Image (tube, coloured by chain):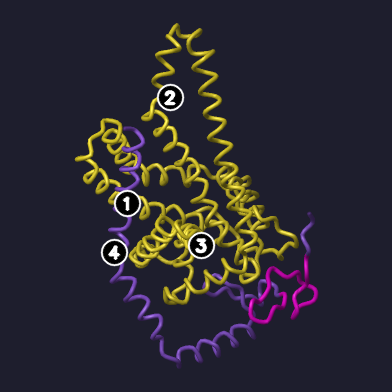
Amino acid sequence: MALKKEMCINHPDRPAIGVCVMTGKAICAECSTRYEGVNYSKEGLRMLQAQRALEAGSTDAPGMLFTVGMIVLSPLFLFLLYLFYYYSLEALLNIGT
Amino acid sequence: MLETNETFWMRLEGRSSVHALDAAIGYIRQNPMRVLGAYVLANTPLALAVAVSLNEVTAGHRSGLAFSCLLLTVSTLWRWAILAVMQRRIQEDITGSPPAPLRRHLGRIIIVKLAANTAMTWGSLAIIPAFYGFFLSGFAVPLLLESNRNTYSLIKQSIAWLNNSRGRLAKLSGALMLQFFAAVIAILVLQLFFTSHVVGSLMGLDPTELALTVWSPLWLMSMGFFLFMAFDFYWTVSAVMLFYDLQARRLGTDLRARMQALSEETNETA
């Protein structure tokens, strides 16, 4: 299957190397900035900055609660892993006998 | 790290549901030594623990089960830590740049894998949690290394991806299960053929005695474990591919084109 090539939205004579995930526009290497593994244009980065500023204003209570909960429950998960192995071996033992 | 350039391609239309599995096979063929060593290191303690456990089971030693399970649990944690190293390498090759350092995120990776594993094992009674647990456990490493955002928002996001791709993932799971059952049948048929017709005439062994060994519970369980290891290796690589394939729209990249670029770079350096 042939690759579909698009031209940069800012530089029509240059082929695009990716798509800005905020604006959805095709951009060339010069216009592209990679942040946290994602391609952004200049406009897209500004939009991301505004979005993150909004998110930072709100409290991250669910995130903290989740993290604390996971840490507290991790010994239980470890015990459940041990139990899973125990009952699996028991089952194999019973099949064998 | 392999030499890479920063070329990304436009997303292709009509990606197949098993695209990630094809990409995994392509990656393993191109770079076997980049992943095989880490995989063997990750699973050697587990293989030893399994050998001890199977020995206890076939000997009927119920008293030894508790210690065997402890060995299995500890070796599983080791396995997850080294597989994280392996998946980080694959992630580095796919993205073309090193992800976050593993040591800072290993704690939360292990905890997420523990939770996902619980969903996959105990949750299998209700089926649906096992679906989420299976995929989340597979791509916990690239998910948590790619971003500094908190674990809660990353997991919420990944569950949303899994929900949106339910159909594709169900087909992928079906393809994996079919491959597994085909491999089981192939091994059993080959074993039957060799023990009944080939080994006896070639090596002068009594086929009846040989059949007693190769159809014994210990032998069958050992073969099952090796088959599991082969598929686990394949899935460990595929899970990273699947993570990036699910994100193709979000990242503005295409996994197939990235694999093609990686293949060209490997051929040039060779």
Of marks 3 and 2, which one's residue comes earlier in the chain? 3
Quarter of image, res B243 = bottom right
Disc 2 + disc 1, Cβ < 8 Å: no
Task: Report how far apart the C-alphas of labels 4 and 2 lie in the structure.
Answer: 38 Å
Residue located 55% across and 52% down the image: B238
Picture quarter with the C terminus of chain B: top right
What residue is drawn where x is 61% and y is 46%? B26
On the image, numbered disc 2 is attached to which residue?
Answer: B215
Front in this rendered view, residue B62 or B15:
B62
The chain coloured yellow is: B
Q: Are marks 1 and 3 on the same chain?
A: yes
**Mainly helix, strand or loop, the magenta region?**
loop
Q: Are marks 3 and 2 on the same chain?
A: yes
Determine the chain carrying the residue at label 2. B
Cα gap from disc 3 to disc 4, whole angstroms: 21 Å
* Labels 3 and 4 share a subunit: no
Magenta region: which residues? A5-26
Residue type at mark 2 is Trp
What residue does disc 4 label? A76
